[in-house]
Image (tube, rainbow, N blue to C red):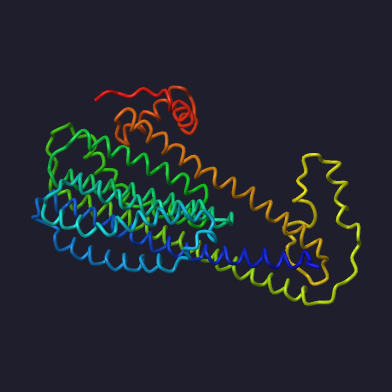
Amino acid sequence: MTSGLKFLLAAKRCEIAELQQLALTSALVNVTGRLVHGLQRERGLSNLHLGSQGARFADMRDRQIEECQQLEAELRQCFDSLDTEAARVGRGARLFSRIAYVLQGLDALGALRERVQALDWTPRQATEAYVRLIAGLLAVVFEAADSASDPEISRLLVALFNFMQGKEFAGQERAAGSALFAAGRAEAAEQQRLLHLIESQERCLQVFAEFAHAKAVDLWALNQASATLAELERLRRVLCTATHGAPLNVQLSQAWFDCCSQRIDRMKAVEDRLALDLLRACEEKITAAQAELLTYDTLYASPAREADALSFFKDMGALRSDPQANPAALGTSAQGYGLELDRSILELVQAQARRLQTMSEELDTVRASLNERKLIERAKGLLMAHRHLSEEEAHKTMRQMAMNQNRRLIEVAETVLSLAEVLPERRP
């Protein structure tokens, strides 16, 4: 007759397989972050090149393209190493769909670079093209965070995703400011865009601080306290306070790019720390799970010992005294999950059940942040489609609604989505 321990062994093997898949996904996230960083720099150099009408920055841009091509090759290798048996990967359909989308963008990257080289596109067009590709890469990281089955790893992925997203907004700020300085003229629309990007960075960094390890948060705080930040704020004021059409000092384009790059490079150091924390967490959990599996195997091979036939029902008193108690959470404490050979099979089952229940509750808490982001993005998309707004305008509209009604942004997003069928469309 099949025993409960046999299925505990199977459960532990499944857990190890999931953790190993998470480790591969974490390695993919690491490479994705490095490529995003490279493309952000390429985007900024492309804007400087276009803003100067091809007169400057060509050599720097060429070297950056070569670096990005090497990172792209590494990322494609990571894609090839993933297990594409969707039935064996949690939420694999969405993750693999994101990867398919990214591969299309990477295939088109050469044509984008040719357009920039030929000066066929404006800085805004080039920026939007790079933003679209980078957004696809960040969506891969988002799906990795959303599909993680371990709460600690999920928290680290959420922190990393939000920090990467904040760094992307910083990269867009660098690109937009570079184009303005290189063109030598202030534009009101671009100034509003810069303000939106600055606010978006802060929002992402707040979520990062909520979910990251304390040492990573401290590292970011340390990197923030510098002369670079003071210079950035000075240049931001130059860009954002100039009247529409006012001349800008073209010579400041390099200073702006260098200042933003220093800050983004420091952000990359924090991002690297987050990626390292993620990989270490995966390795430690795999090692611990393998040790537990070995203990299970040893117990499974040991002679069966007599057990109390009624021990299964010994937690019924707890259920009667607490009607809200979860049966899966009864039994041995999850904190005492160091297995010993003389523990009964029932104790192992109860410990595993309680541990899984705790993990499920923690995952629900972590994913709440991701779900809020999904709803806000969907609501913005709805406003953009129905009222012909830009992404910045849609966000500003929702933010103003939240302030006027003294409500959270997520609550406004839920209201917008609930009114999808009757939302009026603004005529062009």
Looking at the image, residue 428 lies above or below residue 124 = above
Q: Nearer the viewer, residue 277 or 25?
A: 25
Looking at the image, residue 291 lies above or below residue 271 = below
The quarter of the rendered structure image containing the C terminus is: top left
Q: Nearer the viewer, residue 287 or 98?
A: 98
**Residue at image location 46% in from the left, 63% down from the top:** 84
How many numbered tags mark residues here? 0
Question: From this viewpoint, which residue is outermost toward the front?
Answer: 1
Is residue 15 rendered to the left or right of residue 386? right
**Residue at image location 46% in from the left, 59% down from the top:** 274
In percent of width and height, residue 98 lies at 40, 53
In percent of width and height, residue 173 lies at 28, 46
The quarter of the rendered structure image containing the N terminus is: bottom right
In percent of width and height, residue 203 lies at 42, 41
Q: Nearer the viewer, residue 165 or 88?
A: 88
Q: Nearer the viewer, residue 38 or 145?
A: 145
**Residue at image location 36% in from the left, 39% down from the top:** 199
**Residue at image location 21% in from the left, 33% down from the top:** 188
